[in-house]
Amino acid sequence: MVDVWVLGSLNVDVVVRVPRHPRPGETLLGGDPETGFGGKGANQAVAAAVAGARVRMIGAVGDDPEGRAYRERLTAFGVDVAGLRTAPSPTGRAFIAVSDDGENTIIVSPGANAAVGRQEIEALAPAEGDVVLLQLEVGLDVVAEAARRAREAGARVVLNVAPYADLPADVLALADPVVANASEAAQLAASGLRSPRLLVTRGEQGSSWGDVLVPAGRVEAVVDTTGAGDTYCGALAAALAEGADQEAAMRSASEAAAVAVGRRGAQP
């Protein structure tokens, strides 16, 4: 069985529900804060594990109750946390506002995620045929080096360019696929960079990977879109690790994302 390696961020999410998102300079009253687990890296690791993959998480948490709780949580999902380092900074935080229509805005305070660096790159040791899943909530130089190391080892790189930032063209070329939502795909195009293996997710309009088009999974009611894209990426990586072709992997990912938007929070 091949492994899915996830190098990325771990955050504690503080969620407040609002009737709508405020305009600049406006103050709105929201509901009581809800605390949960998030961070693109950990969200994708959990999604891959739920989809049946054997997952190894690489990243950093703080020496605090939140960091210790996160280790226990990932372990409970069957995620290997041997590559999860305790850093002197506090565990990362994300402050999320969710409106009545399920849309969200997010502000991230990186905390320990900013400490992810050489130690985490050295901990990344995929075998040939493994899948390495990356996002952009840790340093871009770390992401770039991790992608290069993964390909040198013969692993498949799945790169989620979120939150969007420009990466070197050679790094984009290493990924199969580069996963972007419609907004991120537009930013990628505007930068003059491109990927020959771009997978674009478009919410209820489905997703496309080259000539392969897959509809979105059926959603009964949208409750919270937080983490839906991460669920898609994690389930996609799990399916690819099992040997699924493009269409089958995308269908599995779309179905998982449809389930995710029907519940609260970024993780199950």
Image: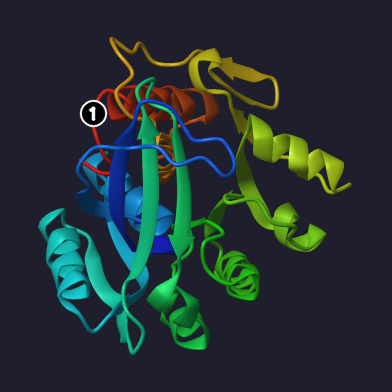
Q: Quadrant of residue 140?
A: bottom right
Q: Position of residue 86 (x, y in %)?
A: 29, 84
Residue 232: quarter of image? top left
Left or right of residue 157, residue 38 in this image: left
The C terminus sits in image quarter? top left
Q: Nearer the viewer, residue 53 or 26?
A: 26
Which residue lies at the image location 24% right of the left edge and 37% below the top edge? 31
Instruction: Judge by depth and name the residue closer to the eye, 221 or 201.
Output: 221
Nearer to us in this view, 229 or 2: 229
Q: Is residue 253 above or below residue 107?
A: above
* Horizontal relation, residue 264 to residue 216: left or right: left
Q: Residue at x 55, y 67 (%)?
A: 150
Q: Is residue 205 above or below residue 38?
A: above
Task: Identify the amino acid type marked 1.
Answer: Arg
Looking at the rendered structure, the number of numbered marks drawn on it comes to 1
Applied colour scheme = rainbow
Q: Position of residue 76 (x, y in %)?
A: 10, 57
* Residue closer to the observer: 136 or 132: 136
The crowd level at tag 1 (other Cα within 10 Å; few <14, some 14-19, many 20+) is: some
Q: Position of residue 123 (x, y in %)?
A: 41, 81
User: SS of the residue at dot 1?
Assistant: loop
Per the image, the residue denoted by label 1 is: 263
Asked if residue 4 can be seen in this view, the reply is: no
Q: Is residue 11 visible?
A: yes
Residue drawn at point x = 39 percent, y = 77 percent: 112
User: Residue 185: where, in percent of width, then height?
Assistant: 71, 37
